[in-house]
Image (cartoon, rainbow, N blue to C red):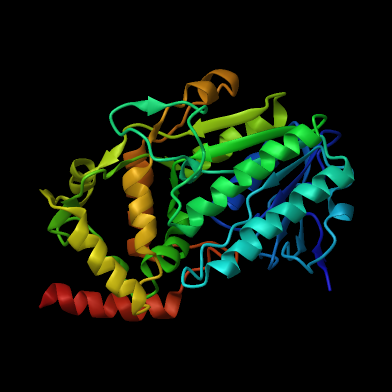
Amino acid sequence: MRRTVEEGPGGTGGAGLRVVVVGATGNVGTSVVRALTEDRAVESVLGLARRVPGWRPPKSRWEAVDIEPGGEDLVPLFIGADAVVHLAWKFQPTHHPAETWRTNVLGSLRVFDAVAAAGVPALVHASSVGAYSPGPKDRAVDESWPTHGWPQAAYTREKAYLERVLDTFEIKHPEIRVVRMRPGFLFKREAASEQRRIFAGRLLPGRLVRPGLVPVVPGLPGLRFQALHTDDAASAYRAAVALPVRGAFNLAAEPPLDSEVLAGLFEARSLSMPAGPVRAALAAAWRLHLVPASPDLLDAVLHLPLMDTGRAREELSWEPLHTSVEAVGEFLAGLRAGAGADTAPLAADRTLHQRLDGVADRIVRA
């Protein structure tokens, strides 16, 4: 049964854009909803998620919806919207890629079909740097770089597959303005607990991830990637909703992150080493279910190209307010503090976090 929660304080704020955000309660969704509700041109935001949050920004209302096959009919929710922003994504279980495919690919197909059936004039889709084929690390590529992903990793396969789906969708529905956002890795303080669960697992003591306690950062060949504060990505999504733009936009902040930059964040040293031993250790931990992040995702990171963001800066008048180092630093501070937010994906594991911190404190004092 569909559950609805009506608008937060502030009403609709007058005539303007009506936007539906699919996957509105995670790292990106919360920032996009906030950016839209703070925009005077936006009349209302309907947030869709599997679980309704306690968070109630002005001009927003919420519906609990499952986008997977067999879930609720999305068309009635999209009718009358000026834009649908599609962000919903499932990262786990990495050991069962058919399950993530069901949500990420088949669920996205349902969203795209509902956009067309409801006559929504604009679709803004969350693609990723992960959709790109392997590319250079010594220069930046624009949005014309091939988007065939890294075939071994489920995340990159799914992102690349949806790029092909949208190629066909745009031909079939030229009346719909389709925008594909391709951000680098996204970080903010409130997402620290969620990202720890997704990539490192619940058993990582946050207090151990701090300057002085991480002695070495591996300098792996190809370890050079781009990051962005999630709120900066959200400002680009807001612009894509409001402006008459189409096509793909790369999103990233400076500088690119490598082992030297990361070592500076941890007051550690960078140590050059081959990727093989690190991958083997990660693969062993993944097979034993000690960490949720697949070694195939590490391979993808080592092969992703650097992106040129000139189109977003020019056509969206977009400029990130945070450097990539600031974004990662804020995330690490959130990790140490066990930060979260009042949505199911971003909720902090308070009890477990306190226990792990107790273990970490004993390790530090030992």
Residue in view at x 79 percent, y 54 percent: 7
Task: Give the vertical position of 329 relative to 337 (above or below).
Answer: above
Q: Is residue 249 left or right of residue 79?
A: left
Q: Relative to 90, is 274 above or below?
A: above
Q: Residue at x 31, y 78 (%)?
A: 356
Q: Residue at x 13, y 56 (%)?
A: 216
Q: Does 236 sit above or below residue 61?
A: above
Residue 6 vs residue 94: left or right?
A: right
Q: What is the number of callouts on the image?
A: 0
Q: Nearer the viewer, residue 166 or 308?
A: 166
For the C terminus, the image quarter is: bottom left
Q: Position of residue 10 (x, y in %)?
A: 77, 47
Q: Is residue 127 visible?
A: yes
Q: Position of residue 289 (x, y in %)?
A: 38, 78
Of 303 and 206, nearer the camera is: 303
Q: Nearer the viewer, residue 315 or 224?
A: 224
Residue found at the far top of this picture? 314
Q: Position of residue 2 (x, y in %)?
A: 83, 69
The reply to whether residue 290 is visible in this rendering is no
Could you say where residue 189 lies in the image, as x and y percent from the top left? 43, 53
Q: Quadrant of the N terminus?
A: bottom right
Query: Residue 317 occupies which quadrant of the picture?
Result: top right
Left or right of 134: which side holds 265?
A: left
